[in-house]
Image: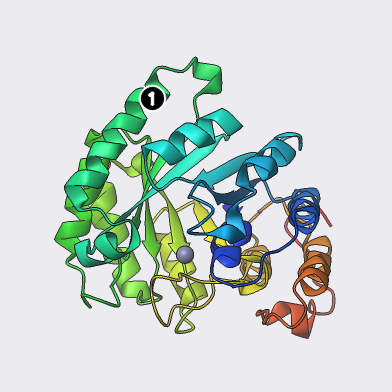
Amino acid sequence: MTISILISEVGPRDGLQSIKRIMPLAAKKAWITAEATAGVREIEVGSFVPAKILPQLADTAELVAHARGIPGLTVAALVPNLKGAEAAVQAGVHKVTLPLSASESHSLKNLRRTHAQVLDDVRAIARLLGGLPSGERPHFEGGISTAFGCTIEGEVAESKVVELAEALMQAGCDEVGLSDTTGYANPAQVRRLVAAVKHAVGSSSLNGLHLHNTRGLGLANVLAGIESGITTFDSSLGGLGGCPFAPGASGNIVTEDLVFMLQAMGISVGIDLSRLLEVRRILIDALPGEPLYGFTPDAGLPLGFVPPTGDKS
Ligand code: ZN
């Protein structure tokens, strides 16, 4: 295969927001630097939410400043609203993602906002970003969470996800992404929904999937995504974390296992897997006793494993 896939590490945001302990700033910086050194090209370093809501991510602006000093790294952050987007712009992020929950009940619980209110914020953020010089304008993604099912509402209608994707693009997002916040997705559903959303908003306006491994289908869903034209996947080192607002959702897909699967398939990701595996040490030392996941880290690389040409090793 000649396709290449971008892996976006979200552990410093999605992972850390779901555990109670606060990782020291120095360890976070070391984690981000080490992953970038291993070849990871995009990292979501935090979220611009009030510190009283998520004290684990209170140092996001400092992490953005640190990560911006790493050549070639795209520095991403989550923003819950216009105020968060203003702080993200101030900090100098390259990419902002605003979550919109396909389930309105989940949206009310998570962001305390209806769909209409979130879309108002999207328009305001698009105006804010549109007023910046092009070199300083972050890429703006609308991330549709609970796109594959919700712990409050159960099944989420695919027509609702399509409708919200269209609304996000009309409100000024540069692209939309689909998030399986609750780990409900299956590969057939991924194929259907990706095709439907790409058909509605244009193929190039949906590139990314954010998958959790709650029921063990994370990598199967990645494969379905690749076969449907998805080129960016969020994952978390050691599968750290999940969504604190979606009970039962534990752990993003594991970056190490994702890299192994793709490289074993001959798909280039630009990452040195041996070096990536060593980055876990930073998490183990900074968060002793915190559960880490992944099969490849325990099993090791197969004898004679050769990564695709172009990937570091
Ligand atoms: Zn997540």
Evaluate whether residue 4 shows in this view: no
The answer to whether 219 is drawn above or below residue 179 in the figure is below
How many marks on residues? 1
Q: Is residue 58 above or below residue 254?
A: above
61 sits left or right of 110 in the view = right
Placement of the N terminus among the 4 image quadrants = bottom right
Q: Is residue 81 left or right of residue 31?
A: left
- The picture quadrant where one finds residue 21 is bottom right
Taking 297 as reference, is 144 left or right? left
Quadrant, the C terminus: bottom right
Q: Is mark 1 within 8 Å of ligand 1?
A: no
> Quarter of the image holding residue 282?
bottom right
Q: Position of residue 300 (x, y in %)?
A: 80, 80
Q: Which residue is under mark 1?
A: 128
Can you give x and y, in whole percent of width and height, for residue 27 in the image?
79, 58
> What's the coloring here?
rainbow
Residue name at image x 46 percent, y 80 percent: 214
In the image, 127 versus 134, the foreground residue is 127
- Counting from the top left corner in percent of width and height, residue 35 is at 75, 55
- Please state which amino acid type lies under the numbered disc 1: Leu
Residue under the point 37% across and 43% down: 81
Residue 75 in the figure: left or right of residue 305: left
**Secondary element at tag 1:** helix
Instruction: Where is residue 165? Give x, y as percent.
Output: 25, 48
Which residue is rendered at x = 72% and y = 57% of the image? 308
Q: Is residue 101 visible?
A: yes
